[in-house]
Amino acid sequence: MVENHVRSALVPLYPRLRRFAVALTGSRAEGDDLVQHACERALTRTYQWQPGSRLDSWLFRIIQNTWADERKSARSRTQAPIEAATDEIGDDGVRRAEARLTLDNVYRELCNLPEEQRAVLTLVCVDGLSYKEVAEILGIPVGTVMSRVARGRLALADRIEASGGHSADNILKLR
């Protein structure tokens, strides 16, 4: 019964899991592989999930642990620029092109941040998780999450503005 619940819940959660994995790895291809490995782990370990607890948090934690395991086994992993995995935005071509350029710039600069900052920014700013939820997923104190979010937001805003992008304040409400 638990296995069927986990299996059926994976499909609607997949875009969020993928977005987190891409943020961790820095590439779409590696993110897809990471999500696949994490889903395989989850399906073979459904007995570890506690019904009544948040399935998405459990899956984010599996992705985080799988990524850590993969990094340990492959010490010199290279990272390609992050590829945007977003829906098209806007009604007309000009707005769509501007939005795409802005998103590409944000993702490119996000990729240049340390992994720890990318992870918390993705979970807090993109997925809308609370600091407490992120702390539980990543296994770190809430204060560390707050610090990484603050430093990550400032660093991302500075990088976007330095690259000649639109004002980061308007893009992501970073400050």
Image (cartoon, grey):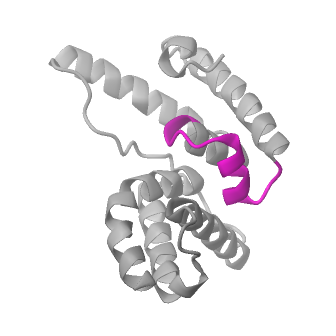
On screen, residue 154 above or below 68: above
Quadrant where the image shows the C terminus: top right
Horizontal and vertical percent for residue 159? 63, 24
Horizontal and vertical percent for residue 15? 37, 54
The quarter of the displayed image where residue 57 is located: bottom right
Residue 128, magenta (yes or no): yes
Foreground pick, 139 / 50 = 50
Horizontal and vertical percent for residue 162? 62, 17
Q: Residue at x 51, y 58 (%)?
A: 21
Is residue 115 something that shows in the picture? no
Q: Residue at x 60, y 60 (%)?
A: 78
On screen, residue 136 above or below 96: below
Foreground pick, 127 / 153 = 127
Q: Residue furthest front?
A: 52
The quarter of the displayed image where residue 69 is located: bottom right
Horizontal and vertical percent for residue 108? 51, 36
Q: Residue at x 40, y 86 (%)?
A: 1
On screen, residue 94 above or below 82: above
Q: Which residues are magenta?
A: 125-141
Q: Residue at x 42, y 64 (%)?
A: 32
Residue 85, magenta (yes or no): no
* Image position of 90 (left or right of 56): left
